[in-house]
Amino acid sequence: MPLKLYNTMTRRVEEFAPLEPPTVRLYTCGPTVYNYAHIGNLRTYVFEDVLKRALQWCGFRVRHVMNVTDVGHLVSDADEGEDKMALGAQREGKTVWQIAQFYWDAFRADLRRLNILEPDVWCRATDHIAEQIAQVRALEEKGYTYVVEGDGVYFDTSRLPDYGKLARLDIAGLQAGARIELSAGKRNATDFALWKFSPPDKKRLMEWPSPWGVGFPGWHIECSAMALKYLGDRLDIHCGGIDHIPVHHTNEIAQAECALGHEWCRWWMHGEFLTLPKAGNETARMSKSSGEFLKLDLLVEKGYDPLAYRYFCLNAHYRQQLAFTWESLDAAANAYRNLKRAVLDLRRDGAEPAAPDEALLAPFRQAVEDDLNMPRALAAFWAALKNADGAPPPAVHATLLEMDRVLGLGVAEMHEEALAVDEAEIDRLIAERAAAKKAKNFARADEIRNRLQADGIELMDTPQGTTWRRA
Ligand code: AMP
Ligand code: ZN
């Protein structure tokens, strides 16, 4: 069976075939490094990692490039607002360069903890200013740009008949809606900055000379310029979160296809959002610039294994929204722990090298090939683990290892000590729970109880204090 993937461009699940098999040229939009990644961002990187592992598992050779956005772009998609990097530097009393390095390192540490394979090439926007200027020049030479005095160089989207094809944008509607705000010099609602000028009276923390004046690149140009440099003029797959469809990826396509003069990328794949439930039935998007977000460090501080978060992500298909709650994370942590226990039991029964069991593997393979259906793939993993048909334990173990090449749940690294609960940690949590109760912070107290329960530790409140036992 061939690998089938959903393509945002065609809105269909299609058989995947790269241009030059077995090579797959994969570009994934990387982090903006003015703050930590939140667990919503990380859900997207987990999805992309599963995609990459699945491609490798299916025999493709993946060349993967990821950018690091370290230029101080503006807070809104509309090329307005404050510079995010400068805000970060101000907040922390560091230089913008220190901020970028610090949060890039933090991001890589998050990837490692989540078993996410690193790209073959990391490319920083600030190391590729010349490439970005070259692409803007190419667009200028072909007549796709115009200058707004005192503002920047803009892309004229009306010059491109199929602008907005990825998002199927209603250009006429957008244009009608924005007529009043267009007075600032932008010709069309969808036009976007390729190069922004520094204000004449102010020195920006990050700025570079260019043929049009001192300034900094627009947000979208780095990806199309660096993808061209590292992957050539045709990509096989380009990924990101769904928020990138209407603006960022739409503009990347406009720039690349106008500069190159041909189709740029065949497959566009997008991960749905991780949401935070709000009061009522509403959900909120987790957003980095709002300042309110959950990071992986917080999960670790609360005692969760980062791979339990990966397991949590795999429980939903990447094209479905996933609502984050502590209860559902607890359920995933519990399931992941049971999975580890079962793997270790199996290993005790026999882990001599063996070939995977094809019958056990078949449903897993079907799930992966069916647009990366990880909930079904996990079910196949569990079915293999339960092994109702009685395959020899070494063959089952080999099957699980084979499946884990896609799942990335660390099956090969699982060992007994990792399951042993640290008793000092239990005592610390019990003390913290008592303090929380005293302070009437019952939510935290319950959270600690649930957390320990997920680890198989049951708390018992007695008049003498709290004791515990293994459930
Ligand atoms: P950023 O660092 O803001 O550029 O975002 C990094 C990646 O995370 C991009 O691919 C975004 O589309 C994605 N992303 C942002 N918010 C979320 C979210 N709540 N859930 C899943 N992915 C997200
Ligand atoms: Zn991008």
Image: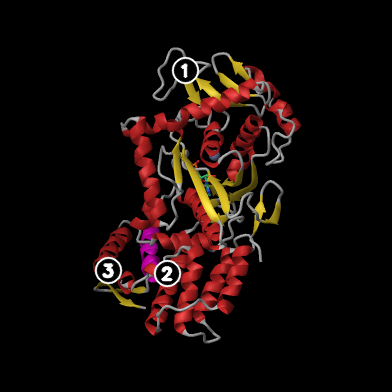
Q: Is residue 350 magenta?
A: no
Ligand 2 lies in quarter: top right
Tell me the mark number nearer the camera, choosing from 3 and 1.
1
Q: Quadrant of residue 333?
A: bottom left
Choose the circle earlier in sequence order: 1 or 2.
1
Q: Is residue 102 above or below residue 356?
A: above
Q: CA distance from mark 3 to mark 2?
A: 21 Å
Query: Which residue type does callout 3 highlight?
Result: Asp
Choose the circle earlier in sequence order: 3 or 1.
1
Q: Which quarter of the rendered picture does the C terminus lie within?
A: bottom left
- Picture residue at 44% right of the left edge, 40% below the top: 291
Magenta residues, as a range?
Answer: 441-454
Choose the circle earlier in sequence order: 3 or 2.
2
Q: Which mark is residue 411?
A: 2
Q: Quadrant of residue 144?
A: top right
The residue carrying mark 1 is 214
Where residue 336 appears, as percent x and y from the top left, is 44, 69
Element at label 1: loop
Query: Which residue type does callout 1 highlight?
Result: Val
The residue carrying mark 3 is 422
Q: Classify mark 1 as within 8 Å of ligand 2 or not, answering yes or no.
A: no
Q: CA distance from mark 3 to mark 1?
A: 57 Å
